[in-house]
Image (tube, helix red, strand yellow):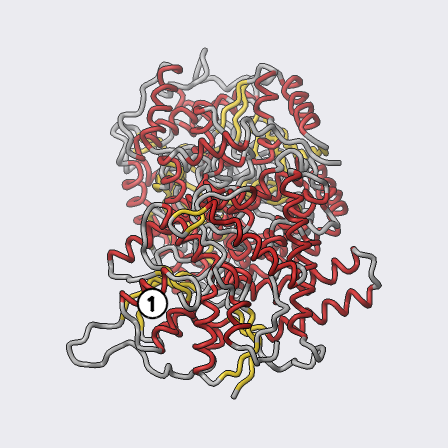
């Protein structure tokens, strides 16, 4: 289930729902953001018709992203943030034959442990004994997942970029280790330029007493041109990166 | 204090010979430099705000140089306030000592590295391996040259001199060594899939992740990393310890200063409006977070940088390591990066290598690796006066008697004769008297001394039977002269 | 009549005076009353780029003096037409600071050093490279070689190379092309036109193999242009021409290389044929 803000630190991802610059959701910005994201080999789904539309689009995105792996159940990890609650991810994913694992201290509990080959030895259903073991289990879980689902803090139209904050209710690995990543983006989060986005981030920082420990700006799936200048997609990071754009 | 750089490895004549005799490498370098230069031009043409941000960012960067020490102190305070550690390293020994100290304390054995020129400067990999640690480069290009046991051929695309066949052969050898399945072919997806599998194991099993840093923001104690592959994120998210080795010249004052600079490396380097991943790291993971390193360290590397502040060379410290000067340089395009004998090649390398390592570390570079064509000055997004610096280094070498005596005498004599019209005309007549001995078919084909450098590979015209001066005296006798 | 002074460059004077003679004819045909200050020797760029700034300064001072003429600096408004883009760049951009610095090095008073800089700036301000002057004085050629008879072949194709200093320090990439077109030829820049030919001053002498490799890359592009019908290679810089021509003949290739002044001179006389171009390229002096 959703487990946000265990230590009382403000849920940074919540601030991503408003863009303090008085910026209106702008169709042109949405289109440019999508165009750039897709040009960078990302996938994009537009769902401007409300929560049901977003769920529909997310279902399409999930099917597209995990269809490459042949076996079931397909494992999807997701940020355990309040923001995603209205979307009923567990229900949505179950209907697609995927298991939904929230990114928490002990992700999955008993559900996942049994069939996960990388579980720590000796009693997979037990709570891990040390924080280190829990961390290790989480990492292996993420590495063995097919898809990570996150929200984002803001996005940039000019460059096709989303900003991901690392906070207690989010995390670095769900958008990095699984084979694919899908981010939910609200049109109101999309600003024109990178400097605009940095200003949004500075405002977030001012409101919350500082920047997150890590912010990753992501512009499409991972890439390299080190082999004869030929572009390779999906080098170390996700092979596929998708965005679902809508309000919910 | 001057810095210390790793030795060049082979002599300049040997490096030059190898480079000129390698048509495969030369073709690969020509192709990649041309492509990157075109991409840069296309990026700025397609995105005018990039250029509009650039010039004020350059000015801000330059004026911040005078405050470097204060900015580094502010950066340190901020990092420490967020639970990180900052240390200053005068040179390679300090860096090695600090990193090995952490490794010993944590019983660390396996290290993954994201690309860092600063760590190559201090030969960190060699220092760690000598202490028994396993070190793996994870940037795809750096991984390739690590397997090949070579130095980088370009500061941005280090394996751009290698063909896919050569890369496949390296991966096949590595597969055999590690007893894993080799790549199924030499197409890009297959080679990439091999590297992805191998390196993922490394990321998941690493005790320490080491990166460089593109910028340091003093205002908030933030490290900025500009990457594309995901290895930078892996290195800074998976291992329990993250150490960043960053030159002191990378510090900027505020986020406002960073805003204009941030897109210049991707735009100038590879023609991207923003790199695939841009990471802002402010301290280690915080209480309640589910992933991220427990420890965050920044090693601020001097190695000869500090003493450039306040000198005519100080704008070299604003270099953003984009590689645009390499891609514009005709000499680089002809000889490739490894011929420079330094991790910094191309025009920036011609200046930075002697400035950091001392003039006698690489005395040939200013004279032999530059045709003074000014292409680098036009290409540099930070408006660094590279040709001016190269000229100054040439002058400094001469002032320090670092040229062969025959050369020195030739120039002194020449200057003396040609500084007045009578001496100038006398040399013409003297050469005309003796040049027949060096001519064939009306051209000079072999000449002594300095001029022999010309005739080694080209013909030269002889001094004309009647110079223009002499023609004018004869054909325009009444004119005012 | 316009008055102008001619700055030929040591390379033209010694190695290809034909270029200077052609320039004299071209300019005189366009109504210029030319003077040639005989005190000129060399702008010192070769020594300067090699780092020998004392020697370069000595030559620079002589050049400044030569163009101040008998009456001192009274000639402010008379243009100095330069037959080398590279030398023009040296004079305009480097010599003023060089002379000031060198005067201080020799222990002269700061006021003297400043005076040297000002004298050099006054001279440099008068200097204009030949193609820039021709481009700005839009006088059509008295006659040109392009035939307007029906069925006549199109204008002669020529390959054109602009040297690095002219391109990047003087910003003059279009004037040579316009001048050539007005002369009735069709100029074609080479692929990778902005890549250096390899001359590089002292670099070319101490690194003959790298220099030649750079030239060979340029000549490969020239081969493509020749395949497309280019009849000669033209440049406004003799240094580049000597580099490219010298490498060509070393491999036994007699493809003609001409200075822009020589080509315009031929066009003026209606002698833009392959035969005339070949003859001009092979000769060196005025009456040869």
| Image quarter hosting the C terminus of chain B | bottom right
Name which quarter of the figure residue C179 lies in. bottom left
Instruction: Report whether residue A52 is seen.
Output: no
Name which quarter of the figure residue B296 lies in. top right
> In the figure, is residue A34 to the left or right of C58?
left
Question: Observer-nearest residue: B472 or C275?
Answer: B472
Residue A39 appears at what percent x and percent y?
34, 52
The residue that disc 1 covers is C187
Instruction: Report whether residue B358 is seen.
Output: yes
Question: Observer-nearest residue: C45 or A217?
Answer: C45
Residue pictured at 55% horizontal, 77% vertical: B477
Question: Observer-nearest residue: C25 or A244?
Answer: C25
Residue B264 appears at what percent x and percent y?
53, 53
| Image quarter hosting the N terminus of chain B | top right
Residue pictured at 51% horizontal, 19% vertical: A128
Using the image, determine if residue B278 lies above or below residue B432. Answer: above
Residue pictured at 49% horizontal, 76% vertical: C133
Q: Residue furthest bottom?
A: C1
Number of numbered discs overlaid on the protein picture: 1
- Label 1 sits on a secondary structure element that is strand
| Dot 1: chain letter | C
Residue C64 appears at what percent x and percent y?
67, 69
């Amino acid at each position: 289930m959703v487990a946000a803000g265990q230590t009382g630190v403000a849920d940074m991802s919540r601030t991503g729902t408003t863009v303090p610059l008085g910026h209106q959701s702008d169709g042109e910005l949405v289109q440019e953001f999508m165009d750039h994201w897709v040009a960078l080999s990302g996938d994009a789904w537009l769902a401007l018709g409300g929560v049901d539309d977003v769920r529909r689009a997310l279902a399409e995105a999930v099917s597209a992203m995990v269809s490459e792996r042949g076996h079931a159940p397909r494992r999807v990890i997701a940020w355990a943030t309040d923001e995603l609650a209205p979307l009923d991810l567990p229900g949505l994913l179950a209907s697609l034959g995927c298991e939904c694992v929230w990114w928490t201290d002990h992700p999955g509990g008993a559900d996942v442990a049994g069939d996960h080959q990388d579980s720590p030895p000796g009693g997979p259903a037990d709570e891990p004994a040390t924080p280190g073991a829990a961390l290790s289990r989480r990492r292996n879980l993420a590495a063995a997942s097919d898809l990570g689902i996150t929200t984002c803090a803001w996005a940039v139209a000019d460059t096709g970029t989303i900003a991901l904050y690392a906070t207690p209710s989010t995390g670095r690995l769900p958008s990095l280790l699984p084979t694919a990543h899908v981010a939910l983006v609200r049109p109101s989060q999309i600003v024109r330029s990178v400097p605009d986005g940095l200003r949004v981030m500075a405002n977030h920082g001012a409101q919350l007493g500082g920047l997150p420990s890590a912010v990753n700006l992501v512009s499409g799936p991972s890439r390299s041109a080190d082999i004869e200048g030929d572009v390779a997609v999906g080098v170390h990071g996700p092979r596929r990166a998708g965005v679902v754009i809508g309000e919910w | 204090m001057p810095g210390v750089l790793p030795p060049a490895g082979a002599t300049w004549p040997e490096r030059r010979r190898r480079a000129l005799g390698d048509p495969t490498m030369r073709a690969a370098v020509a192709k990649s430099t041309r492509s990157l230069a075109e991409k840069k031009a296309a990026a700025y043409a397609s995105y005018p705000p990039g250029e509009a941000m650039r010039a004020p960012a350059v000015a801000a960067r330059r004026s911040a140089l005078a405050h470097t020490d204060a900015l580094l102190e502010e950066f340190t305070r901020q990092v420490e306030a967020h639970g990180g550690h900052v240390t200053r390293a005068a040179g390679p020994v300090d860096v090695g000592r600090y990193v090995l100290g952490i490794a010993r304390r944590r019983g660390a054995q396996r290290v993954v590295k994201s690309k860092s020129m600063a760590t190559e400067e201090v030969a960190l990999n060699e220092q760690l391996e000598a202490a028994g640690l396993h070190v793996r480069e994870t940037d795809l290009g750096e991984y390739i040259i690590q397997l090949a046991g070579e130095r980088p051929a370009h500061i941005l695309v280090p394996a751009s001199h290698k063909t896919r066949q050569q890369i496949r052969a390296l991966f096949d050898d590595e597969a055999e060594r590690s007893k894993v399945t080799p790549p199924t072919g030499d197409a890009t997806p297959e080679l990439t899939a091999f590297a992805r599998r191998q390196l993922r194991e490394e990321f998941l099993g690493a005790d320490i992740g080491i990166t460089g840093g593109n910028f340091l923001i003093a205002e908030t104690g933030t490290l900025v990393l500009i990457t594309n592959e995901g290895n930078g994120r892996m290195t800074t998210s998976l291992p329990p310890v993250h150490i960043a080795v960053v030159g002191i010249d990378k510090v900027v004052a505020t986020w406002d200063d960073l805003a204009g600079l941030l897109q210049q490396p991707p735009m100038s380097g590879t023609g991207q409006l923003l790199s695939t991943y841009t990471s802002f790291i402010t301290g280690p993971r915080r209480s309640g977070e589910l992933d991220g390193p427990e420890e965050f360290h920044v090693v601020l590397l001097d190695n000869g940088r500090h003493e450039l502040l306040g000198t005519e060379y100080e704008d070299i410290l604003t270099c953003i390591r984009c590689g645009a000067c390499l891609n514009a340089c005709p000499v680089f395009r002809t000889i490739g990066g490894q011929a420079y004998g330094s991790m910094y090649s191309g025009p920036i390398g011609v200046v930075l290598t002697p400035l950091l390592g001392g003039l006698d570390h690489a005395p040939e570079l200013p004279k032999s690796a530059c045709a003074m064509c000014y292409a680098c000055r036009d290409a540099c997004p930070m408006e660094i006066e590279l040709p001016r610096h190269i000229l100054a280094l040439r002058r400094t070498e001469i002032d320090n008697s670092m040229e062969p005596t025959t050369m020195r005498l030739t120039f002194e004599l020449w200057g003396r004769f040609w500084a007045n019209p009578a001496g100038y005309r006398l040399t013409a007549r003297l050469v005309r008297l003796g040049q027949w001995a060096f001519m064939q078919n009306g051209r000079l084909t072999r000449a002594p001394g300095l001029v022999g450098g010309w005739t080694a590979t080209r013909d030269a015209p002889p001094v004309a039977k009647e110079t223009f001066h002499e023609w004018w005296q004869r054909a325009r006798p009444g004119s005012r002269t | 009549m316009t008055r102008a002074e001619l700055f030929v460059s040591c390379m033209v004077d010694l190695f290809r005076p034909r270029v200077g003679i052609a320039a004299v004819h071209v300019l005189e045909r366009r109504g210029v009353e030319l003077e040639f200050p005989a005190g000129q020797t060399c702008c010192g760029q070769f020594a300067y780029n090699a780092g020998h700034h004392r020697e370069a300064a000595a030559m620079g001072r002589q050049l400044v003096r030569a163009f101040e003429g008998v009456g001192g600096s009274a000639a402010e408004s008379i243009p100095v037409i330069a037959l080398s883009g590279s030398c023009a760049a040296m004079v305009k951009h480097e010599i003023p600071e060089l002379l000031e610095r060198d005067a201080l090095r020799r222990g002269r008073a700061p006021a003297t050093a400043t005076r040297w800089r000002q004298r050099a700036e006054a001279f440099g301000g008068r200097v204009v490279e030949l193609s820039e002057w021709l481009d700005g004085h839009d006088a059509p050629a008295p006659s040109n070689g392009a035939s307007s008879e029906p069925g006549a072949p199109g204008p002669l194709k020529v390959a054109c190379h602009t040297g690095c200093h002219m391109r990047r320090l003087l910003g003059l990439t279009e004037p040579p092309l316009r001048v050539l077109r007005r002369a009735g030829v069709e100029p074609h820049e080479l692929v990778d036109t902005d890549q250096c030919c390899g001359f590089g001053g002292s670099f070319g002498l101490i690194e003959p193999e790298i220099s030649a490799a750079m030239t060979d890359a340029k000549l490969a592009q020239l081969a493509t242009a020749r395949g497309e019908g280019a009849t000669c290679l033209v440049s406004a810089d003799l240094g580049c021409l000597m580099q490219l021509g010298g490498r060509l003949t070393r491999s036994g290739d007699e493809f003609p290389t001409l200075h822009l002044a020589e080509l315009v001179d031929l066009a003026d006389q209606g002698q833009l044929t392959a035969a005339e171009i070949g003859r001009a390229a092979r000769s060196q002096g005025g009456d040869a």
